[in-house]
């Protein structure tokens, strides 16, 4: 019987406005992988065009707080007045099946995951410069001036936390950034501590031939 290998947990994170979501979507559009996206839960109002269950699970404050009490989240954070969290059950189930699970979350949440699942791969998506971050937040047009300022202030506090991650990917061009993320995931599979036991099994098989 072949036992399933536990899958790889990939955390894409970084300040709001760096284009994490766009990089994540471009990553999923690339060929030749079997990644699964962990849809988050939020209390933020649904934006036009967003799909329930695909972009987010949209729930009330009360519902979210009930789930916090039930310990239903791998991590959760309050971000600019709303709750965001990663439902634990699906992530666990996918990892058990040996799937590669991608989280796209803000910085506080990523640092919580780092504590709980240090074997994950932590990627900080960075903007090429601060102006591009501001321009992106303005262009998105989904936030008011006040919220944009709050997101910018938060980003300023998050830039110095990049050193806590395994990799930094600059989002200079979306498809390049997505290519680099996929290259990182592939390289992680070959990392000695992840692959040595398979290699040892190969040596064992060779011995008895
Ligand atoms: P937005 O409101 O722009 O969709 O998301 C705001 C921020 O929350 C983004 O940085 C996004 O990556 C992050 N985010 C989305 N889902 C989660 C989650 O489940 N947990 C945490 N900690 N952050 C999340």
Image (spheres, rainbow, N blue to C red):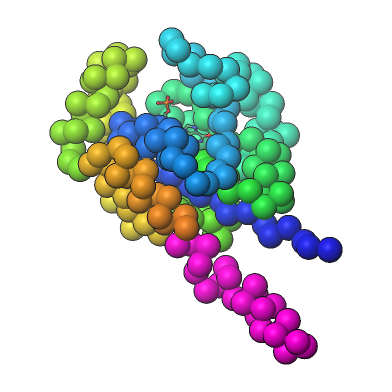
Q: Residue furthest front?
A: 209
- On the question of residue 113 being in view, the answer is no
Residue name at image x 31 percent, y 31 percent: 17
Asked where in the image residue 140 lies, by quadrant, the reply is: top left
User: Camera-side residue: 32 or 102?
Assistant: 32
Residue range highlighted in magenta: 187-209
Q: Nearer the viewer, residue 179 or 122?
A: 179
Residue drawn at point x = 40 percent, y = 49 percent:
181
User: Which residue, as the protein is rendered here, is positioned at the far right?
Assistant: 1
Residue at point 57% right, 45% down?
Answer: 34
- The quadrant of the rendered image in which ligand 1 is seen is top left
Residue 24 picture location, percent across and down = 43, 37
Residue 154: x percent and y percent?
31, 35
Determine if the magenta segment contains residue 207.
yes
**Which quadrant does the N terminus fall into?**
bottom right
At a point 77% along the width and 88% down the height, the residue shown is: 208
- Residue 37 in the image, given as x and y percentages of width and height: 55, 37
Res 43 visible: yes
Up-down relation of residue 206 to residue 7 (above or below): below
Relative placement, left or right, of 157 versus 87 is: left
Figure quadrant of residue 74: top right
Q: Residue furthest bottom?
A: 207
User: Magenta stretch containing residue 10, yes or no?
Assistant: no
Q: Classify 163 as above or below 101.
A: below
> Which one is in front, 146 or 133?
133
Is residue 63 toward the left or the right of residue 103 in the image? Answer: right
Q: Residue 199: x percent and y percent? A: 62, 77
Quadrant in the picture for the C terminus: bottom right
Q: Which secondary structure is most common in the magenta stretch?
A: helix
Q: How many marks on residues?
A: 0
């Amino acid at each position: 019987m072949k036992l399933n290998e536990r899958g790889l947990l990939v955390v894409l994170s970084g300040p709001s406005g760096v284009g994490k979501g766009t990089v994540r979507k471009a990553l999923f559009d690339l060929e030749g992988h079997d990644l699964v996206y962990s849809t988050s839960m939020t209390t933020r109002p649904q934006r036009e065009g967003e799909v329930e269950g695909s972009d987010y699970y949209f729930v009330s404050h009360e519902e979210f707080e009930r789930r916090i009490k039930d310990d239903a989240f791998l991590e959760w954070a309050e971000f600019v007045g709303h709750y965001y969290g990663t439902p634990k059950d699906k992530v666990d189930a996918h990892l058990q099946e040996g799937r590669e699970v991608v989280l796209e979350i803000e910085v506080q949440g990523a640092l919580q995951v780092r504590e709980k699942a240090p074997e994950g791969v932590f990627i900080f998506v960075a903007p090429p410069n601060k102006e591009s971050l501001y321009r992106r937040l303005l262009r998105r047009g989904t936030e008011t001036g006040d919220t944009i300022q709050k997101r910018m202030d938060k980003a300023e506090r998050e830039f110095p936390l990049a050193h806590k991650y395994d990799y930094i990917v600059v989002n200079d061009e979306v498809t390049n950034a997505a290519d680099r993320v996929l290259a990182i995931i592939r390289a992680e599979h070959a990392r000695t501590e992840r692959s040595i036991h398979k290699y040892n099994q190969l040596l064992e098989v060779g011995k008895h031939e």
